[in-house]
Image (cartoon, rainbow, N blue to C red):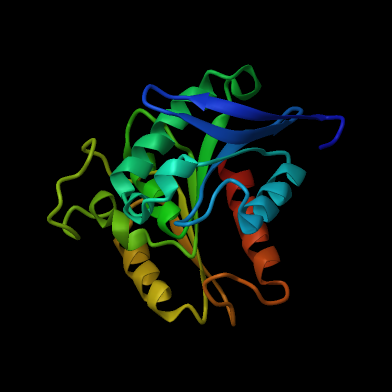
């Protein structure tokens, strides 16, 4: 944290649960990015924290939080309960808008793996008013019904589709996820882009690969969170 940054560990008090998070907002921030981690991960995800630090260097606020409590996370099925994770993300978005640090800021979502499905579903909910979405290695196929009404027979939750500018970032060697992202990219009707990090697998563990993810995300959010 710098002298020009407000940072705090926060308790996110929702109607049914209290979640733990870390909220950091640089002075004169142009926007705030809420992170949705993947299955089996948490707000301590080293990859998400790396990206968050890069975003803050670009003047963007970040909120990393646990989508599940420790007890809930012990039940593996909760990690893949996308409607539950979406509800948590949406409720947390409403919570953070009430924080004085985030007052008036544009808000974006950064979703990783299954968290990307929650991010897309959350962005499709009209009450969230999300201005940009970035997916890293996302299971975006799990949100197909809010991307293209013809892509799934599942009824849309909240009745919306994604209209926020959406960036999909995928490793070139993450073949199955890349295929799914190509399909969703084609189905999206909003402003969208697909960035492939050549040679990277699902976890972007190679030299410079996570840096590429962070730079792509920072550029996208800086352009769309005003």
Q: Can residue 226 be seen in this view?
A: no
Q: Number of numbered discs present?
A: 0
State the residue in front, 218 or 51: 51
Q: Is residue 108 visible?
A: yes
Q: In this view, does 203 lie above or below 44?
A: below
State the residue in front, 131 or 128: 128
Residue at the (41%, 29%) spot, across then down: 91
Q: In this view, does 214 lie above or below 221?
A: below
Residue at the (36%, 60%) spot, across then down: 140
Q: In which quarter of the image is residue 138?
A: bottom left
Q: Is residue 183 above or below residue 44?
A: below
State the residue in front, 33 or 30: 33
Residue at the (42%, 50%) spot, across then down: 74
Residue at the (45%, 36%) spot, across then down: 130
Q: Position of residue 89 (x, y in %)?
A: 43, 37
Q: Which residue lies furthest to the left in this view?
A: 153
Q: In which quarter of the image is the C terminus?
A: top right
Q: Position of residue 46 (x, y in %)?
A: 66, 56
Q: Quadrant of the N terminus?
A: top right
State the residue in front, 4 or 226: 4
Q: Where is residue 146 in the image (x, y as percent from the top left)?
A: 27, 49
Q: Position of residue 143 (x, y in %)?
A: 30, 54
Q: In this view, does 73 lie to the left or right of 25?
A: left
Q: In this view, does 61 lie to the left or right of 114?
A: right
């Amino acid at each position: 944290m710098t002298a020009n940054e407000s940072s705090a560990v926060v308790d996110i008090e929702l109607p049914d649960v209290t979640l733990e998070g870390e909220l950091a907002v640089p002075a004169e921030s142009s926007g705030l990015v809420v992170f949705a981690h993947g299955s089996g991960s948490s707000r301590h995800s080293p990859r998400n924290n790396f990206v968050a630090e890069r975003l803050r260097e670009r003047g963007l606020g970040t909120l990393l939080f646990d989508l599940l409590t420790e007890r809930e996370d012990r039940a593996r099925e909760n990690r893949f309960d996308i409607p539950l994770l979406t509800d948590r993300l949406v409720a947390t978005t409403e919570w953070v808008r009430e924080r004085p640090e985030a007052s008036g800021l544009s808000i974006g979502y950064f979703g990783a793996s299954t968290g990307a499905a929650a991010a897309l579903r959350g962005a499709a909910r009209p009450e969230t008013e999300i201005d940009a979405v970035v997916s890293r290695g996302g299971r975006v196929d799990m949100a197909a019904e809010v991307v293209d009404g013809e892509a799934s027979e599942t009824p849309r939750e909240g009745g919306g589709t994604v209209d926020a500018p959406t960036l999909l970032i995928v490793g070139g060697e993450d073949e199955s996820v890349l295929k799914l992202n190509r399909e969703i990219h084609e189905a999206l009707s909003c402003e969208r882009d697909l960035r492939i990090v050549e040679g990277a697998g699902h976890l972007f563990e190679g030299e410079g690969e996570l840096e590429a993810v962070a730079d792509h995300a920072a550029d996208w959010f800086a352009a769309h969170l005003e």
